[in-house]
Image (cartoon, rainbow, N blue to C red):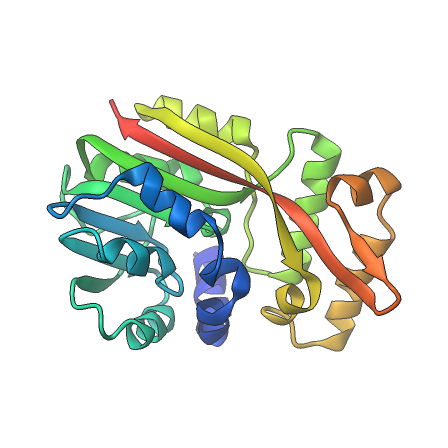
Amino acid sequence: MKEKDDVKQAFSKNSEAYVTSSTHSKGKDLLQLVDWIEPTADMIILDIATGGGHVAKCLSEHVNTVYATDITKEMLNTASTHLKGYQNIHYVIADAENLPFLDHTFDVVTCRIAAHHFPNPEKFIRETERVLKPGGKFLLIDNVSPEDNAYDTFLNKLEKMRDYSHIRSLKVSEWKQLLHENQLGISHHELKKKTLPFEEWINRMIDSQYEKKAVTNYILSATEQIHTYFKVVNDNKGLHSISIDEWMVLCEKV
């Protein structure tokens, strides 16, 4: 599938950047997810689309075993190199929509800042439910679109311009529907703004100055309402930051 090949290509090229990215490596949600999950020493955890391995690292200190999976081999190689001292993390190349694990295997499944790259989020959620034990927990963190269609269109076009492997940031209402359809009851959830430092954010995926200018102009030419909603900060040095919505949700398999 072309979309999945795009993801492999994009993240193979930028694997190191995702390990060091401030957005991915230093988010307060890493501490928060530990509090929400309440991990115990006997747990076996699956981290889907582990990227730089930040969630796997956080949880490995509290549980028996973490399986860190990613569709991109180079991403897993980079993560394993940075986490070589963590002996209870195992690395598996895996497609989030077709997981190579038996039913009812894991106590917890996590997926952080990745699902907007999945072509078929309904398959991802169905697979998550399948591999979870009865009563198991699922924690999802991802960029989400506003419910307003104009803001939704702006965000997803912006993300696609900046990263060709982006598929779509879903609305919270769409995620809730998928979770409900797959017997994943919501225990906690939180919607918050996430500020993206513009230069770091755009340089992580784009090398071309022409493409960078196109993204910059797209943001600057947007309406005042969009600038207000996405908290666009533009100073005498140029675009400083933009803020997008991020949803964190903890579910339990019914």
Image point (63%, 68%), residue name: 200
Residue 65 appears anywhere in the view: yes
Viewed as shown, does residue 46 lie left or right of 167? left
Looking at the image, the residue that sits furthest to the left is 42
Residue in the foreground of this view, choosing between 98 and 68:
68
Picture coordinates of residue 132 (x, y %)? Answer: 21, 37
Viewed as shown, does residue 224 lie left or right of 87? right
Image point (48%, 67%), residue name: 18
Image point (35%, 61%), residue name: 71
Residue 94 appears anywhere in the view: no
Image position of 251 with respect to 63: above or below: above
Task: Pick the quarter of the image with the C terminus.
Answer: top left
Image position of 249 with respect to 200: above or below: above
Picture coordinates of residue 140 (x, y %)? Answer: 40, 41
Task: Pick the quarter of the image with the N terminus.
Answer: bottom left
Residue in the foreground of this view, choosing between 6 and 114:
114
Residue 19 is drawn in which quadrant? bottom left
